Image: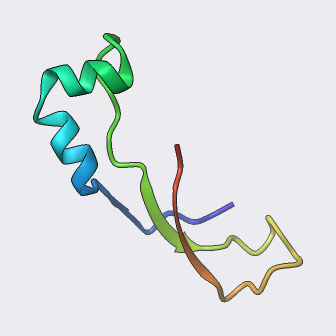
Amino acid sequence: MVEVKVVSINPVDYKVRSNEDGLNMIYGTDHPAILGWDIAGPVVPWAIKSLNLTRVIMFSAR
């Protein structure tokens, strides 16, 4: 588990969102599409005891 501190929309999300055809090609025609899957934050202590709990990670949740 990660305590989410920061989320962002990366350049690819921005470009896909600005082009309706690109949005449909990647996400299909079901709208609204959720953008902003890039996440950063500290590992929650009780979630994974074997990791260094001071570690801050970043990842794409897709």
Question: What residue do we see at 15% from left, 22% from top?
Answer: 20
For residue 3, above or below residue 28: below
Horizontal arrangement in the rendering, residue 40 relative to residue 1 (left or right): left
Q: How many marks?
A: 0
Query: Quadrant of the rendered structure where residue 34 is?
Result: top left
Coordinates of residue 56 in the picture (x, y in percent):
57, 80
Coloring applied to the structure: rainbow
Residue situated furthest left in the rendering: 18
Horizontal arrangement in the rendering, residue 35 relative to residue 44 (left or right): left
Coordinates of residue 62 in the picture (x, y in percent):
52, 43
Query: Quadrant of the rendered structure where residue 45 is?
Result: bottom right
Question: What residue do we see at 50% from left, 63% from top?
Answer: 4
Figure quadrant of the N terminus: bottom right
Q: Nearer the viewer, residue 29 or 48?
A: 29
For residue 19, above or below residue 36: above
Coordinates of residue 11 in the picture (x, y in percent):
22, 55
For residue 44, above or below residue 20: below
Coordinates of residue 46 in the picture (x, y in percent):
81, 69
Question: What residue do we see at 18% from left, 35% from top?
Answer: 17
For residue 20, above or below residue 36: above
Residue situated furthest right in the rendering: 50
Q: Nearer the viewer, residue 58 or 24?
A: 24
Horizontal arrangement in the rendering, residue 40 relative to residue 35 (left or right): right
Query: Quadrant of the rendered structure where residue 52 is?
Result: bottom right
Question: What residue do we see at 53% from left, 49% from top?
Answer: 61
